[in-house]
Amino acid sequence: MNKSNMRGENDFGYWAYLQSAKPTMGGMAAEGQLMFKLNNTAAWLEALATEDPAKYKAVMLQARRDRAKWHQTYEDRKKELREKEETKMRQKAEEHAANLRKKQLQMETQRKMLQKHGGPVSCESSCRDFIEQLSVSPLSDRKQKDILRTHIMYIKATNPEMAKSNKLFVLSSKGDPHPFTQLAANLQAIVTSPAFTPDTNTGQTSEHTVGSSASSFSKEDAEDEISRMKAQFLSKAINDTVHERETESEAEKRNDKESEGQNEESNGDGVEREEE
């Protein structure tokens, strides 16, 4: 066993070179060229043709006979891998849709709870009235804090960009839940922020949305999600290929300049020797 991973790095390096230099090359052709190059097959065949011509002819004849079989084996393997990949991507699409349905149902539950207590708030005045009405309600202190926390979480779901790295959406400090006054102050600061966008959905609209999203995830939806993922992978592969080609072009130019400099130095040394 090799003590280093140099061989593996060389193999992957040559594979990356083939993908960037010949992006339209098929997988089987790339694998064949990779094995042919790194296994020194050409040198072995050349030596075999000289040392044992009969064996050389037998090897070439057997390779031609097995060509169709190996092509079919490769296509079967590629089809199997493609089916596994599509199954995996379809599962991810279904999980993504299930998470969306769960999130929408959770938001609908939060919205109904807030509507019972005068929410959700949409401006500074409605937020002030909501907090005042909640503070004088006969609810327990724990229930009042739960309602404020629910409202902050609801705004976080409807304003995800605003909630990024925003301390106003933090509900506790060093493991201790915020008191009512702190939660109320955070809610007022969130609502008065220029980045805040009030929720304009009504109960009927949200129920319709949740009802439609809670329906079964169809095969067409899964295929659309798979096509979207494939497009993202293709775009990333094209960008990586362009970047690799630019890097290789810069390296070639640098090597050309270095070789020109070396040629000039060698020519200068030759002239000096002639003069001597």
Image (cartoon, rainbow, N blue to C red):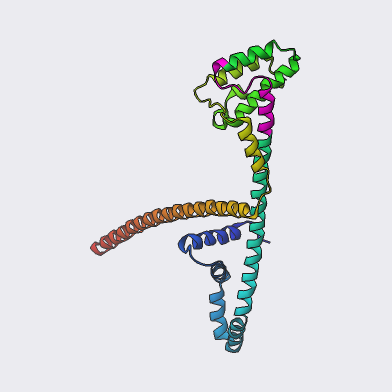
Q: How many marks?
A: 0
In the foreground, 26 or 34: 26
- Residue 66 can be seen, yes or no: yes
| Front position in the image: 12 or 129 | 129
Q: In which quarter of the image is residue 57?
A: bottom right
Q: Nearer the viewer, residue 68 or 128?
A: 128
Q: Quadrant of the N terminus?
A: bottom right
Residue 98 on image: x %, y %: 68, 44
At x 65% / y 38%, what residue is drawn?
Answer: 210
From this viewpoint, is residue 173 visible?
A: no
Q: Is residue 139 left or right of residue 81?
A: right
Horizontal relation, residue 177 to residue 192: left or right: right
Residue located 39% across and 53% down the image:
250
| Residue 65 horizontal/vertical position (percent) | 61, 84
Please, is residue 212 above or below residue 269 in the view? above
Instruction: Judge left or right: residue 101 versus residue 246.
Output: right
Who's the residue at 50% across and 66% down the image?
Answer: 25
Left-right relation of 7 to 238: right
- Magenta stretch: give its range: 106-125
Relative depth, front residue between 205 and 149: 205
| Residue at figure coordinates x 56%, y 29% from the top left | 200
Residue reaching furthest to the bottom: 54
Relative image position of residue 175 (x, y in whole percent): 71, 22
- Whether 110 is among the magenta residues is yes
On the rendered image, what quadrant is the C terminus found in? bottom left
